[in-house]
Image (cartoon, rainbow, N blue to C red):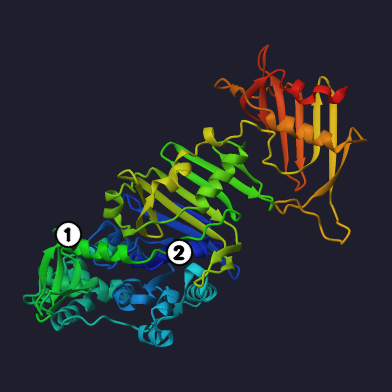
Amino acid sequence: MPNEAHIIALAGNPNVGKSTVFNALTGLRQHTGNWPGKTVAAARGDLTYGGERFTLVDLPGTYSLFPNSAEEEIARDYLCSGEAEAVLILTDATCLERSLNLVLQTLEAADVPAVVCVNLLDEAAKKGIALDLPALSRALGVPVVGTAASCGEGLDELHAALAAAVREKPRRRETAVEYPRAVERAVRVLEPALAPFAREQSRFYALRLLEDDALFFTRFGADLPALAAERIGEVCVRARAELGELTGDALRDALVGALSDRATALVRYQDGTEMTLDLGGDVPTTSYSYFRWSGDDGVYMCDSGLTDALLTTATRLLPVEQPTLSKDLIDQVTLSRADGETAVLLSNDGDGHYTGLLVEPYQYPVDPEQAEALLTALSSFRLGTREAEANAEIRAQYGLDDPELTLWIHQAAGTVGQVDENGQLAAVEVREQALRFVIGRAEGEVFYTCEYAGSCYLVSRFLLETLLAATPDTLVARQPADLGGAALSDILIESPLGDVHVTAQYTERVLPNNDIETDAEGNTVYDTAVTLNGEEADAELLTTLTTRLNALTASGDLPDGWTVPEDEAPRWRIVLTTVGGATREIAAYRLDAFSDALAVHGVAIHYVHEEAIDLILADLLD
C-alpha cells in the first residue's frame, strides 16, 4: 500500500548513543512494550521524511549476532526475519574498531540495504580522533553517515540516506569477515548447499550451522523439502570435519571475537615493571571472562569479578554528560508507576508564573506552587556516577526491571543559559527533546539507581524527592481560582446574589524620559483600568477580588462516585481569563445543606462550604 510505513531496524553496540539517535529521529512518536515471549523491552518509533513514512525498530544493544543472551538472540533473529526493509547500524566514533565486529556480522546476516551511522563525532573530536568516513564507506560497500545526535549534527543526512536505502534498494558489495583458514574451508563446503534457500545470507547461516545453531532450519524449515534437509545435514557433517580441533569454545572464540578487547588495563609495579591485561568477552555459561596478558599469545580466563571491577572503576572516572533540562522549556512530564500514570502539561507566562494541567488520570488544574516545584525538580535533575551499561543483567541487579518510577519528559526547543568553559553565562540553543529516565531501587540512604540512554547511573535521592512524591492527590489545586499570580483580564461571577463582571486593562507606565517604569525588583509597573459591570471602578477592587478568589480553598474530597449532575444548573459559576488568554471555569453544585461540590472544567473532586461564594462577593453587590 502506498501509505504503508517502511520498516528500518536499528542495531548497534550498547553505549554508542543508540537511544539518542532513536529519540532524535522519532521524537515522541514512539511505542514501547516487550519482544514476544521475552522480558526484554521493545521500542518502535515513527518518522516522516520526503513524504514517506518510516517505522524505526530499536533492537537491543548487542556486541555480537552470535548470541550469548536474550538481547543478542532477539537482535539476530529480527535481522534475519526479513521484516525490515533496511538496517541502520550505529557505531562509536571514539572507538570505531569495537563496533566494526557487529557491523560486519550484520552485513552478513541481513539481506537488506544497510546504512552505517558513525555517532559521537563530537566526542571523537574532543579526543583528537579524525575519521575518513568516505574511505570507510568504500571499504564496507555501504553508505556511511557521521552524526553527533545529542546536538542534532548529521541527522538530515541520516534521514536522506535511510530514505534512499529503502527507495533505491542498492545492492551492496559483499564484505566478508575473514575467519581462520579451517573455518573458511568448512564454510566453502557448506555454503553451496544453503545458497538456494538463504541466497546472499548463505555464508552467515553456514557459520551458524558450524556452531550447531539451528537458525537456518528455524528460518527456512517450513519451505525446505525433506531430501534437501537431509542433504544439508550430510554436508554439514563433512564441513565440520574441516574444522579439526577448532570446536566448542575455541570455535566460538574464532567466530564471536570474544578476544576483542573490551578494555585494556596497564598494571605498573613498584620495581618499574609493567604488565598489560587485555580484557575480553565473558566465557559462555560460566562466571569467567577471557583475557590476555603482554608477552604471551595464549588466551586465559579470569573471574569476571575482576573484569567488572576494572570496567566499573573506569566508567566511574569518566565525566557524565548531563541532559539539558530547562524550567522554562519543559512542557510535559509523565510519571509512570506500577499503579498507573500521572501526566502533566506545564507552561509559564514568561514573567515567572508557572501553571500546570493534570491530564492523566483525569483533567484538573495543578496547584501553581506544585507546578513550579515540579519544574524546579526536573531542571535540577543531575545524573551521578555511571555504573554500567544497562543490559538485562544490570537492569535486574539494579531494580530497573521493576522500577519505582519511569519519568518521561518533553522539552520544547528554545534558548537556555549555560556557563561556558570560561565561566561566562552564554545563551545556548537547544533542540526539542523527549527524554526517559527509569528510577530503580534505593541504594542505601543517599542514592537511587537510574537508567538513561542505555546506561545505569546513581542519582541523589534528594533530587528525586519531589518527583517520587508527585501523585494526582499531591498535585491537584485545592485553591482552584489561584492562577499562580498570572494577571487577570476578565472575571465573570454568576450567583444567586447577582452577577459580577470585572474587566482589567494594563498599560505600561512611562516615565518623563520615556523609559518604562520598574519597581525595586525590576518588574514593569502598570497602570490598571478596571470596570465593574460596565462601569469604571477603582483598581483596588480588582486587587480585593483577586485576593478573595485566590483564598477559595477546598474543604475536603467528594465522596467516591459523586459526579456532576447532567440536568442540574450550577448554583454559582466563576470564569477567569488571564492576559495571556488562559481560562478557568469553576462551578458549584449543591452537595448537602452545608456544602457545595466544586467542579473545575466539569471535573469535580473537592467540595467547599456553601458560604464560599458569599465571602468572595461580600460587599461587591452593595
Is the residue marked by circle 1 packed among few (<14), some (14-19), or many (20+) residues within 10 Å?
Answer: few
Q: Quadrant of residue 551?
A: top right
Residue 374 in percent (x, y) is at: 54, 45
Q: Secondary structure at mark 2?
A: helix
Which residue is drawn at the image coordinates 54% and 22% (left, top)?
560
Q: Left of 511 or right of it: where is 166?
A: left
Q: Which residue is mark 2?
A: 20
Q: Amino acid at mark 2?
A: Thr
Which residue is drawn at the image coordinates 35% and 58% (left, top)?
385
Residue 570 visible in the displayed image:
no
Q: Which mark is residue 472?
A: none
- Sequence-wise, the earlier of marks 1 and 2 is 2
Residue 10 versus residue 361 in the image, above or below: below
Q: Amino acid at mark 1?
A: Gly
Q: Residue furthest left?
A: 245
Q: Left of 571 or right of it: where is 381?
A: left
Residue 510 in percent (x, y) is at: 86, 56
Which residue is drawn at the image coordinates 30% and 44% (left, top)?
444
Q: Which residue is mark 1?
A: 305
* Quadrant location of the C terminus in the rendered image: top right
Residue 235 in percent (x, y) is at: 15, 74
Residue in the foreground of this view, choosing between 300 and 140: 300
Q: Left of 205 or right of it: where is 92?
A: right
